[in-house]
């Protein structure tokens, strides 16, 4: 296995402490910046501040005053349901692999591809830029509301001149301040955000205390002009303290004109303002490049921030409804200052939230732009490749056009279904393969489908949306035949696929030998990136073939051998099963040689034994609600050459785990429990290997039980870890010793299955003879065939002994990487 590597093996998953840490920097290169920010400073603080922004101080009264408490709570619930769905999506992507700089853009582009990620990333960048400007303009308004020069010439604190030019100047100065903080690095930004968080928290605390501590009072409202331009008498809103009558009056909606704009408020307009205060959940994700552990920090920190802000909003809604009459809520949006024990602290909170929101938007925009430039999606972007003259992502089209262009097909494509199929097949370029897109693409070689129906359906479950090809070799030489005998057979095989209800293609070939025909099918089946990567064969043993056409309800037909419409019955189109003892079309030598050929061609191999013993409910397309609990057992190490310690972490062992996990996703197998067995070496301490495997399973998000078993018979084998993998089947040990090892391994596996030694392959009894869970399917590590073809029969005999009486068993050897911890 020295030549077989996996991206997972580049990670120190099996260190002494079982820590799953990458060997390189966060960005995948040695020059990547150090990740220093914790979950609290890097995610919770910026997300909370961005979600509060200025709305929490200046629009709580607006929402409750117009919508009433009940509708305000309904709006808040709807807004946070939308946020929760978004947060769950972010959590799913962030925990699906290693997250680097670029935040939401990086996660989307690595999940949905550069086309979607590029357009959305550009929109994210522009949205953050605009969000920074909006926050700064809000801050300017809040400052001028207190310190702006009054046109009447009053003195005091109102000294700042106002006007469009002055407002632009103030906003530019504040932008320079915010930009300077962000330019100096994420560390300074985090410290500034933390200081802002303390100020905002102190301001909110003073407001909450004020609701309880302040006595009822009348608060003057902003004067409104009369009909002839004169001012109306001063009006007052009332802070009543906790009063049930006030709460009752504030329960229902009372939409009125906004005193600042004169526009009539509605449910939609009030909800728009409230929802603007609930956004900002991507502020923490945008800091992904500076987080110590972004895959953990982003989901955890975002959820904490959302829960915290939800609680604060509900608390403020209730306190405002209990203590403030509707007039005060509707006509004084800054009433927090009027009821505060120390009004300047509320101003500090308003200014701090505005500054933090603008900083968060600006630094988020810079990180997204940097990630876009590094990916070189747009020509001329800072950090991109200067030699590109065109836009590799989208000639800079708006995201809406990108969506419509990807969703709406071209008019010509509606005329012929072959055109879009060809287009997307051409896009499946094998040169762009990535391990995270790997799917089992199976080629199942079938001699006679009468005896292979259970395997045919099991392979259909293992494909997980990948390619599935049924292959058959007809023996013959076209030079000696008047016509091609293969073409008339396609109709029967396609009818077989329909009747068996599997999603498979059919590929037939004519060849002088089954082995050569298998080579042909492995080379030419499929198109482009849709080509088989895994060969599936039935096991070569002396078990008498069964005719499943006689017992399967889907293939039961009238006795006269015809179907509806007079077409011949399917059972008449395939020959009866081979009689016991009759010669086979494939010799044991050619069978093992076919396995060796597939491995030479870099194809994974699956040998399926006793699949006919699988119960029908495990092979149908319904839910897997079985009356008895079943297990799926995985032995991810070579039992014919056991090794202690971390020997199971190779490509083949990971392939077994992947295939078993894929099968567990099928509805018919949902109720089966996945169990993984580790064999302890002669000098290995119990628990060490289990801890390392559990760390690996946690990284791969595989739920399974882990069991350690003592492998006493393999003590001698563990001393020769430097030998080549096939030593036991290549003659490195004596035939008698190899046979004894295979027999001992078989006994070990059976002892863990709950079948006992006499229960037989389908026995329902547990190990103690009582009814209990048994193993429905066993995954075993298939050793490579020996280098010497003369030893092929001995190799097959060892596999026969190893899998004897284990019930349905899949012996698997994987040669392609199937797992990766990166996005």
Image (cartoon, rainbow, N blue to C red):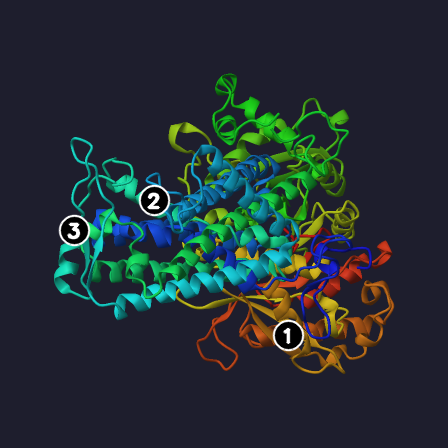
Residue 464 or residue 585, whichever sits in front: 464
Mark 3 or mark 1: which comes first in sequence? 3
Residue 734 located left or right of residue 461: right
Q: Position of residue 88 (x, y in %)?
A: 46, 54
Residue 574 or residue 247, whichever sits in front: 247
Secondary structure at numbered mark 1: helix
Say which residue appears at 72% left-offset and 47% top-offset.
603
Secondary structure at numbered mark 2: helix
Q: Which image quadrant for residue 386?
A: top right
- 563 relative to 273, above or below: above
Secondary structure at numbered mark 3: loop
Q: Position of residue 538 (x, y in %)?
A: 64, 52
Mark 2 or mark 1: which comes first in sequence? 2
Q: Report crowding for label 3: few under 14, some 14 to 19, many 20 or more residues within 10 A (C-alpha).
A: some
Say which residue appears at 53% left-offset and 62% top-offset.
194
Q: Tell me the residue that label 3 is attached to.
A: 252
Q: Tell me the residue that label 2 is attached to.
A: 273
Q: Which image quadrant for residue 470?
A: top right
Mark 3 or mark 2: which comes first in sequence? 3
Say which residue appears at 76% left-offset and 52% top-offset.
29
- 381 relative to 612, above or below: above
Residue 186 or residue 472, whichever sits in front: 186
Alpha carbon separation for disc pair 2 and 1: 51 Å
Residue 217 located left or right of residue 636: left
- Quadrant of image for the N terminus: bottom right
- 624 relative to 139, above or below: below
Q: Which image quadrant for residue 310?
A: bottom left
Q: Tell me the residue that label 1 is attached to.
A: 691
- Does residue 622 appear in this view? no
Q: Report crowding for label 1: few under 14, some 14 to 19, many 20 or more residues within 10 A (C-alpha).
A: some
């Amino acid at each position: 296995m020295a030549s077989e590597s996996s991206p997972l093996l580049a990670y120190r998953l099996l260190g002494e402490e079982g820590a799953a840490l990458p060997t390189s920097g966060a960005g995948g290169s040695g020059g990547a910046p150090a990740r220093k920010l914790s979950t609290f400073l890097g995610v919770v603080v910026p997300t909370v501040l961005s979600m509060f922004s200025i709305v929490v101080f200046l629009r709580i009264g607006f929402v409750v005053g117009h919508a009433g408490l009940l509708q305000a709570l309904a709006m808040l619930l709807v807004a946070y349901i939308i946020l929760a769905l978004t947060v769950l999506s972010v959590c799913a992507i962030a925990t699906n692999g290693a997250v680097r700089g670029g935040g939401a853009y990086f996660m989307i582009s690595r999940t949905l591809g550069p086309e979607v990620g590029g357009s959305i990333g550009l929109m994210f960048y522009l949205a953050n830029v605009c969000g920074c400007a909006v926050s700064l303009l809000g801050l300017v308004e809040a400052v001028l509301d207190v310190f702006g020069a009054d046109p009447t010439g009053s003195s005091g604190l109102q000294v700042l001149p106002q006007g469009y030019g002055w407002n632009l100047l103030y906003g530019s100065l504040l932008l320079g301040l915010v930009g300077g903080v962000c330019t100096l690095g994420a560390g300074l930004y985090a410290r500034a955000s933390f200081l802002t968080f303390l100020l905002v928290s102190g301001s909110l605390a003073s407001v909450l205390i004020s609701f309880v501590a302040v006595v009822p009072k009348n608060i003057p409202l902003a004067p409104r002009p009369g009909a002839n331009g004169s001012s109306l008498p001063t009006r007052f809103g009332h802070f009543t303290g906790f009063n049930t009558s006030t709460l009752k009056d504030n329960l229902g909606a009372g939409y009125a004109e906004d005193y600042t704009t004169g526009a009539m408020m509605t449910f939609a307009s009030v909800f728009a303002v409230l929802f603007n205060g609930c956004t900002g959940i991507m502020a923490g994700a945008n800091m992904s490049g500076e987080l110590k552990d972004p895959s953990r920090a982003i989901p955890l920190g975002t959820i904490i921030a959302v829960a915290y802000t939800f609680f604060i909003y509900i608390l403020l809604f209730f306190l405002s409804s209990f203590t403030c009459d509707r007039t005060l809520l509707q006509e004084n949006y800054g009433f927090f200052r009027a009821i505060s024990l120390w009004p300047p602290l509320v101003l500090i909170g308003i200014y701090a939230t505005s500054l933090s929101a603008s900083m968060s938007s600006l630094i988020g925009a810079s990180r997204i732009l940097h990630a876009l430039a590094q990916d070189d999606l747009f020509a001329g972007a800072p950090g991109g490749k200067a030699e590109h003259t065109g836009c590799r992502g989208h000639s800079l089209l708006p995201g809406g056009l990108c969506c419509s262009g990807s969703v709406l097909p071209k008019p010509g494509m509606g005329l012929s279904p072959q055109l879009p199929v060809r287009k997307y097949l051409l896009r499946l370029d094998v040169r762009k393969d990535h391990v995270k897109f790997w799917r089992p693409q199976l080629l199942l070689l079938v001699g006679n489908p009468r005896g292979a129906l259970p395997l045919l359906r099991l392979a259909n479950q293992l494909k997980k949306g990948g390619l599935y090809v049924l292959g058959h070799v007809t023996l013959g030489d076209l030079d000696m035949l008047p016509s091609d005998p293969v073409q008339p057979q396609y109709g029967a095989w396609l009818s077989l696929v329909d009747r068996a209800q599997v999603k498979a293609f059919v590929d037939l070939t004519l060849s002088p030998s089954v082995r050569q025909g298998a080579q042909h099918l492995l080379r030419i089946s499929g198109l482009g990136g849709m080509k088989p990567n895994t060969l599936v064969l039935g096991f070569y043993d002396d078990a008498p073939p069964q005719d499943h056409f006689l017992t399967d309800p889907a293939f039961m037909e009238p006795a006269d051998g015809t179907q509806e419409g007079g077409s011949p019955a399917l059972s008449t189109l395939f020959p009866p099963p081979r009689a016991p003892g009759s010669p086979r079309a494939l010799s044991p030598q050619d069978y093992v040689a076919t396995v060796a050929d597939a491995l030479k061609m870099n194809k994974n191999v699956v040998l399926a034994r006793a699949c006919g013993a699988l119960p029908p409910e495990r092979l149908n397309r319904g839910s897997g609600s079985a009356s008895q609990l079943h297990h799926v057992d995985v032995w991810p190490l070579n039992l014919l050459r056991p090794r202690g310690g971390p020997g199971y972490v190779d490509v083949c062992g990971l392939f077994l785990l992947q295939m078993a996990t894929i099968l567990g996703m099928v509805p018919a197998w949902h109720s089966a429990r996945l169990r993984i067995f580790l064999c302890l070496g002669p000098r290995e301490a119990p628990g060490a290997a289990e801890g390392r495997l559990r760390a690996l399973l946690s990284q791969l998000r595989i739920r399974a039980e882990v069991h350690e078993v003592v492998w006493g018979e393999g003590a001698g084998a563990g001393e020769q870890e430097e030998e080549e993998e096939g030593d036991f089947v290549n003659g490195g040990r004596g035939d008698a010793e190899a046979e004894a090892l295979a027999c001992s391994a078989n006994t070990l596996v059976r002892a863990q299955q709950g079948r006992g030694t006499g229960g037989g392959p389908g026995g329902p009894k547990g190990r103690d003879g009582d009814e209990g869970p048994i193993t429905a399917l066993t995954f075993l590590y298939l050793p490579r065939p020996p280098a010497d073809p003369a030893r092929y029969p001995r190799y097959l005999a060892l596999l026969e002994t190893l899998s004897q009486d284990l019930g349905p068993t899949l012996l698997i050897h994987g040669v392609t990487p199937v797992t990766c911890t990166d996005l």
